[in-house]
Amino acid sequence: MTSDPLYQTLPNPLRQKVLQMVQKYPDTLDVINEIIMHYTPELVHKKQKKDLSTIGSLIYTLPDFSFISPIRKKVSLKLHQTGLSLADLSIPYVDIDRILCFETPNKSKLNWTVVIKTKSTSHLMNSNTIIFSFDDVIKGFKITHIGDNFKLTNRIPKQLLFEAFSKTMHKLNVVEPDPLFVSKSKSKFIDCYNRAKDGVLVFFEDSLFFGLKKPLMYFDREMIQNIQIVGITNRTFNIHLELKANDNDKEYDLDLVEFSLIDLVEMEFVESFIRRFLKQSNELSSNKIKSKMETGDATNLAADVILSEDDEDYISGQDIDDVTLLFKRKRLQKSLTRTIIQVPKKLKKMKMKKDQLVSLL
């Protein structure tokens, strides 16, 4: 249970009913809190309001970005000595796990989305996730700074933002999508569904991000056991992410996440990404195992193995099944079937022709 449950903010009769249910079914508390956070996000900000003095003095002010999480409005993002702030919310840099930047989907002109992810062992991103967007070209865009040591040299908004993050005390690095992945539409993401929710799946070299609607999900290499292409039809296919066991995800009881209804034209590009991703994962796992064996630390070798060679689902980094072969095999099977049916007929005709020739002789 959380130390400060949000159901305490509910009106008294309802609060008592929820309390009785939580006492009877303790596992429901997290779900109840998430429902309250979903419909009343202002409670989250009030609950998480902090003293900005804890993150040091202000260094940069990044003006008027369009935020969609944790609030929906245009506000300034401020970078302090040891953390960043947004309205009443502040996050220390040590709590930031990853900063992602990718082209915003479905925009008529070039626009960028930035996702600031806080540390978590779950693939489900929490309510502290900061998401904002900005145009590639902004007239008069300027990041104000304090002190000569923090002057910025870039002029393009995106590069200015990257430079400001890199000059913080923790030298925050912004990660962009896999340069080798380009979809049929020349973008770094594909449209898909997770259950009934539509969204985009963005491909990074060592991770995947699904958004920009809730639930937001992030999968780094350490979370993923395997990736498979399944459910191939004439128009679409699905992606299965097999996740490693994680006690923090017991609430959702998920070890497999599916992204569905992906346009078939994207399969070649997705397949190439999967090949690279799994190959690198297996190589990294092999290096970890080798290192542990050399140092004598073999207690957690099983956790470092992506798939055993004895496993029927094993996919070698150097010899990954090309999914397009499925189609070639199917076409070949159909062709062979037709040939097998046609051969006796042709032989019969050939025999007839031979008999006719013999009779002529």
Image (spheres, helix red, strand yellow):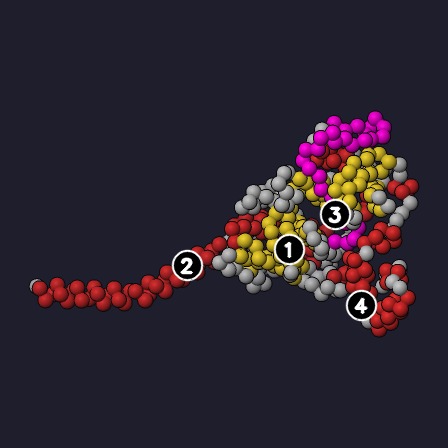
Going by the numbered disc 3, the residue's amino acid type is: Ile
Going by the numbered disc 1, the residue's amino acid type is: Asp
Q: Residue at x 10, y 67 (%)?
A: 359
Which badge, 2 or 1, is on the more N-terminal residue? 1
Tell me the residue that label 3 is attached to.
68
| Alpha carbon separation for disc pair 4 and 2 | 50 Å
Left or right: 114 with respect to 334? right
Would residue 46 be counted in the magenta stretch? no
| Alpha carbon separation for disc pair 2 and 1 | 32 Å
Going by the numbered disc 4, the residue's amino acid type is: Asp
Decide: few, some or many residues near mark 3? Use Cα within 10 Å; few <14, some 14-19, many ≥20.
some
Q: What numbered label is drawn on residue 27?
A: 4
Which badge, 4 or 2, is on the more N-terminal residue? 4
Which badge, 2 or 3, is on the more N-terminal residue? 3
Which badge, 1 or 4, is on the more N-terminal residue? 4
Secondary structure of residue under mark 1: strand
Which badge, 3 or 4, is on the more N-terminal residue? 4
Nearest the eye: 314 or 81: 81
Image: 210 above or below 170: below
Going by the numbered disc 2, the residue's amino acid type is: Arg
